[in-house]
Amino acid sequence: MRGISAKSLDEVLAAVSAAGSGSGDLGTELFDVVATLDREPALRRVLTDPSTEAEAKAGLAERIFGGKVSADVVTVLRVAVSGRWASGRDLTDGLETAGVTALIAAADGKGELDAVETELFEVGRFVRSDAELRQIVSDRGLPSAAKGELLSTLLSGKVSTTTLALASQAAAARTGSFERVLTAFGVIAADRRSRLLAEVRVATELDDSDKTRLAAALAKKYGRDVHLNIVVDPSIVGGISVSLGDEVVDGSMSTRLEVARRRLAG
């Protein structure tokens, strides 16, 4: 998000921060507001019309949503519609980001942020492993509520309520595929502590001391703390492969053997 929309998003996120970490209800209620505005493009246009006074738009939003959502959500919504947005879609995208941020803040406040980051990664792997499920959750033609119910059936009791709420929102596939959106949510979680996300593939599980040493080495290299998402993959034979953003550091034995084979093949 750029320009006037970026400035407005900063103001919305500041309003979320001012509301406190809470229980996470702020986040899920903001997702409900986003769903309503997505269904009502005419309302979205009115609430982002630059020719309408900010107070008038804020008052309209309060009349429509007041009594249906908490006072904190109304406060955030008033700030949102009082801002300037390059498009109506930027408003709803900004409110979705605000909802994610609120859920992440609540998880952090309860000491659950590390678990949520790992669970988001594992949910992404779980969906990728099933082609039919992957297609379903990324299909924008299917009702978001139905996709959310499917994920709830599959994931309830296996992940936290925060992770389930984020996964269900990612299934709305508003700004891209389920996997792309879920990854973006994971980045927001990592940014909460100014961390980077690293996918680490190893042949056998690392013990805690190995994880600590690896995280420290990566933090030294990149100048920021790093959250490790470990994947045990026997096919790499030995060594380790680390993906961090667009950068891949592949020291796996399988890769070394493949390089040697190609050199011998000439």
Image (cartoon, rainbow, N blue to C red):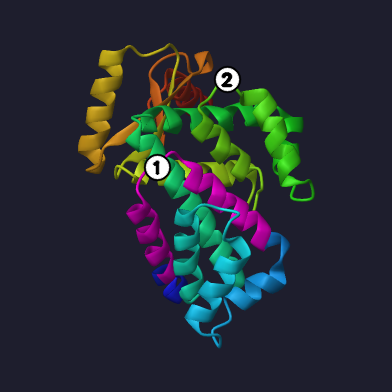
Considering the whole magenta stretch, tell me its main secondary structure.
Answer: helix
55 relative to 212 in the view: left or right: right
Residue segment shown in magenta: 8-37
- How packed mark 1 is, by other alpha carbons closer than 10 Å (few <14, some 14-19, many 20 or more), is some
Precedes in sequence: disc 1 or disc 2: 1
| Residue 173 coordinates in the image, percent (x, y) | 65, 49
- How packed mark 2 is, by other alpha carbons closer than 10 Å (few <14, some 14-19, many 20 or more), is few
- 176 vs 103, nearest the viewer: 103
Mark 1 vs mark 2, foreground winner is: 1
Determine if the magenta segment contains residue 12: yes
Q: Residue at x 48, y 80 (%)?
A: 54
Mark 2 = which residue? 157
Q: Distance between the residues labelled 1 and 2?
A: 22 Å
| Residue 5 coordinates in the image, percent (x, y) | 47, 71
**Amino acid at the residue labelled 2:** Gly
Q: Which residue occupies the extreme right position in the image?
A: 141
Can residue 91 be seen?
Answer: yes
Q: In this view, does 134 lie above or below 44?
A: above
Q: Residue at x 79, y 50 (%)?
A: 141
Q: Which residue is drawn at 44% across and 31% down?
A: 116
Of the numbered discs in the image, which one, if any, rests on residue 4? none
211 relative to 139 in the view: left or right: left
**Amino acid at the residue labelled 1:** Gly
Mark 1 = which residue? 22
